[in-house]
Amino acid sequence: MAYPFFFFFLSFVSFFFSWGNFRYGPIFRTSIVGQPVVVSTDADFNFRVFQQEGNAFQIWYTESLFQIIGKQSVLAHHGGFHKYLKSLTFKLVSPEALREKLIYEMDASTQESLSSWSKLGKLDAKDGTSELVFKYAAKKMLGYEESKDQQKLRDSYKAFMDGLISFPLNIPGTPFHACLQGRKKAMKVIHDIFEKKRSGNDTSKDFVDHLLEQIEKEDTILNEEIARDLVFLFLFAAHETTSTALTVALRYLDGHPRVMAELKREHENILKMRETEGSAISWKEYKSMTFTHMVINETLRLANITPGILRKVVKEVEVKGYTIPAGWTVMVCPSTVHLDPNVYENPHEFNPWRWEGKELHMGSKNFMAFAGGTRLCVGADYAKVQMSIFLHYLVTKYTWRVTNGAERIRTPTGICYPKGLHMEISENK
């Protein structure tokens, strides 16, 4: 048994997992704010939890977190309705959509953003990648362009993110209050866009139009509140996780010249094989980026945005000689599996070659960067395509280096650089 203080747990979540694993083994019982919780750093049990979603286990979050992400969020729903909501977003980011359209749109948007970076010369990598990813996602989902709008949607999301894991005290000046205000402002922008679409004053076609079509069907099970929450959460997930992963990739690449050289070689070969100079990245070229995919896998393994995922036990389960009663909570910890020396040799080392020749399936028991089971992230391929395009242009068209950012910490919402990750970048002549 272990009874860590709740806010110690929030502040030092990764250390807590490692300490608990060392002292009690890969599956141990603890208590968080008086509630019994089984913490699992065991790959087999983690995989089982995800595979039995909706049967023995059910997604669970605190009331304060639902207050932040929305009570009608896709995360709040289960079974058939969750599957339906997931299918709506999957249509936007399916392999077909990526291959036929999104890859070319991402290409143009990424080139435009990197060009603006080079004009600045110096920037914070997290701010830059966040703007790059958010700009495309917001335009694709909402037809939103920040330069043309008075309301700063990305600023609202930043306030939301900064207070996402904080003490739920809703008074002015607290991170939790700022988080709720950020959500409120973002939802106001999303609401206004829905209204504009309904009035016919916006003729552009995007994800919101698709949702409105679903709402207006006679036999619909979708309403506008759920649709707006779906947009809010998907836009958050689409930009925050990818921008964090890209920032971590920049830091690792800067410190590993051999990896950088191999990455550059792969992308220069793509340019040499291209029939039309200056054309956008094709799907065939993307699929040929073998080493790039290895770099991305290794980045995701080490960055692992979510250190702990909660599930409620809905019926008693037996695991490795232990009984977990119904009503208890299980916390699955993929990050500890990603850093397990029994699974990965020298796990703290950035080594993309460890993925060489390996057939990787998203949501496999030893690699859960995108969760697993019925909750496997629908945007996994979307994120990997966007990261690949970014790396292609970064290593073939620009000279860059990280100037500051050695200090990094892992928070409950992922890796961050307290003093920023500053970089210099210039376009090759």
Image (spheres, grey):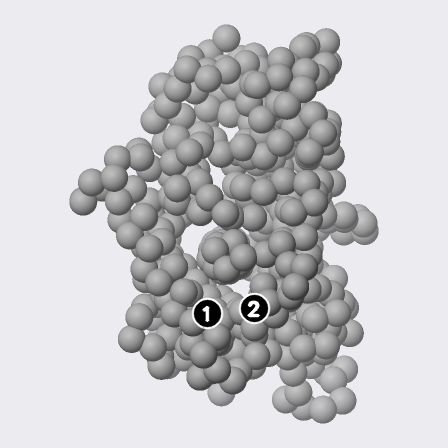
Give yes or no for contact between labels 1 and 2 (Cβ–Cβ under 8 Å): yes
Residue depicted at x 36% and y 53%: 183
Secondary structure category for the residue under label 1: helix
| Residue 26 vs residue 89, the one in the foreground | 89
Q: Residue 51 location, x and y as percent?
A: 73, 34
Q: Tell me the amino acid under the disc marked 1.
A: Phe
* Residue 243 visible in this rendered orientation of the protein: no
Residue depicted at x 36% and y 31%: 11
- Relative placement, left or right, of 427 versus 390 is left
- As drawn, 247 above or below 176: below
- As drawn, 417 above or below 62: below
Q: CA distance from mark 1 to mark 2?
A: 8 Å
Q: Which mark sits nearer the N-terminus, 1 or 2?
A: 1
Residue depicted at x 64% and y 79%: 104
- Relative placement, left or right, of 272 versus 212 is right
Q: Residue 157 location, x and y as percent?
A: 37, 57
Q: Quadrant location of residue 100?
A: bottom right
Give the residue furthest to the front.
218
Residue tagged 1: 194
Residue tagged 2: 212
